[in-house]
Image (spheres, helix red, strand yellow):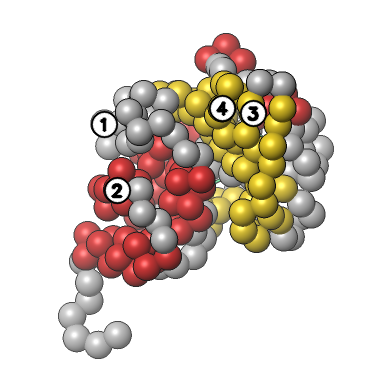
């Protein structure tokens, strides 16, 4: 506005207050993670001034880092157990920011990214931040990562026409999967919950994500 420009930590604190607390993000663990993790390090330096603004930003390769509110909202929507012992699967590592937030509220995070350059960069940023409970794999996330499952939560951060079938089989009983589902430009965020052999689904909020490509997405 006017006067002194905010420092990055000041901008981050304001982001939490205005964009998250002001919009019903109320899990203290998630608010703390969003206060701690420096989002600016997940984008190029030329975007640092907008790193705590209320929107997505480009991360190269025609991909984006999601709006901070959406990252917090999706994390909260997973309803992970309160003990921080959860094992979580993410599809679409991108910048690694969502994985970094998850790393603060889960015991282990597995994340799959199809673009090797993005996966490498994300890995480097996480390593620089001394986050050591995230494992990244390059591949088609539509198949999930059965070796480490079943998971306490699965989060898909790219939009598919429908829920990739292999993912629901990798959910623990009672666990949730959160994913943007719908046409290419505009989707609904769904939460699926597995209870025994039954899957229930809820429609949470309208969103706009980049497409999930590959076998269980929009193809290559
Ligand atoms: N969660 C990211 C943002 C995701 S952008 C963050 O915090 O920055 C969506 C990402 O999904 C892109 O990087 C894109 O390359 C990736 N993606 C698209 N289809 C995929 C697939 N089938 N498997 C794995 N990653 C995929």
Q: On residue 130, which mark appears?
A: 1
**In front: mark 2 or mark 4?**
4
Check the image and report above or below for 104 versus 202.
above
**In front: mark 4 or mark 1?**
4
Find out whether the residues at labels 1 and 3 contact each other: C-beta distance under 8 Å: no
**In front: mark 1 or mark 3?**
3
Residue 149 in sight: yes
Label 4 to label 3, Cα distance in Å?
5 Å
User: Few, some or many C-alpha atoms within 10 Å of disc 4 (few <14, some 14-19, many ≥20)?
Assistant: some
User: Few, some or many C-alpha atoms within 10 Å of disc 3 (few <14, some 14-19, many ≥20)?
Assistant: some
Q: On residue 194, which mark appears?
A: 3
User: Few, some or many C-alpha atoms within 10 Å of disc 1 (few <14, some 14-19, many ≥20)?
Assistant: few
**Which residue is nearer to you in this view: 96 or 17?**
17
Q: On residue 28, which mark appears?
A: 2
What SS does tag 2 mark? helix
Horizontal and vertical percent position of residue 117: 53, 36
Horizontal and vertical percent position of residue 81: 41, 31
Q: Which residue is mark 4?
A: 174
Residue 140 in sight: no
Mark found first going from the N terminus, 4 or 1? 1
Label 3 beta carbon within 8 A of ligand 1: no
Find out whether the residues at labels 4 and 3 contact each other: C-beta distance under 8 Å: yes
**Which residue is nearer to you in this view: 144 or 119?**
144
**Which residue is nearer to you in this view: 120 or 135?**
135
**In front: mark 1 or mark 2?**
2
Label 2 to label 3, Cα distance in Å?
26 Å
Mark found first going from the N terminus, 2 or 3? 2
Label 2 to label 4, Cα distance in Å?
22 Å
Mark found first going from the N terminus, 1 or 3? 1
User: Few, some or many C-alpha atoms within 10 Å of disc 2 (few <14, some 14-19, many ≥20)?
Assistant: few
What SS does tag 3 mark? strand
């Amino acid at each position: 506005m006017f006067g002194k420009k905010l420092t990055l930590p000041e901008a981050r604190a304001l982001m939490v207050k205005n964009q998250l607390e002001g919009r019903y993000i109320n899990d203290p663990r998630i608010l703390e993670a969003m206060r701690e993790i420096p989002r600016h390090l997940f984008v190029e330096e030329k975007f640092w001034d907008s790193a705590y603004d209320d929107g997505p930003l480009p991360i190269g390769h025609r991909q984006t880092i999601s709006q901070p509110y959406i990252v917090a909202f999706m994390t909260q929507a997973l309803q992970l157990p309160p003990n921080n012992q959860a094992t979580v699967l993410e599809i679409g590592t991108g910048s690694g920011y969502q994985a970094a937030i998850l790393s603060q509220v889960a015991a282990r995070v597995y994340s799959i990214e199809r673009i090797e350059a993005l996966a490498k960069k994300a890995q480097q940023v996480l390593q620089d931040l001394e986050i050591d409970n995230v494992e990244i794999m390059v591949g088609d996330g539509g198949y999930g990562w059965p070796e480490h499952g079943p998971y306490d939560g699965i989060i898909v951060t790219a939009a598919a026409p429908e829920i990739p079938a292999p993912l629901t089989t990798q959910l623990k009983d009672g666990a949730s999967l959160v994913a943007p589902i719908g046409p290419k430009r505009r989707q609904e965020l769904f939460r699926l919950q597995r209870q025994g052999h039954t899957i229930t689904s809820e429609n949470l909020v309208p969103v706009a994500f980049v497409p999930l490509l590959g076998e269980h997405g929009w193809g290559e």
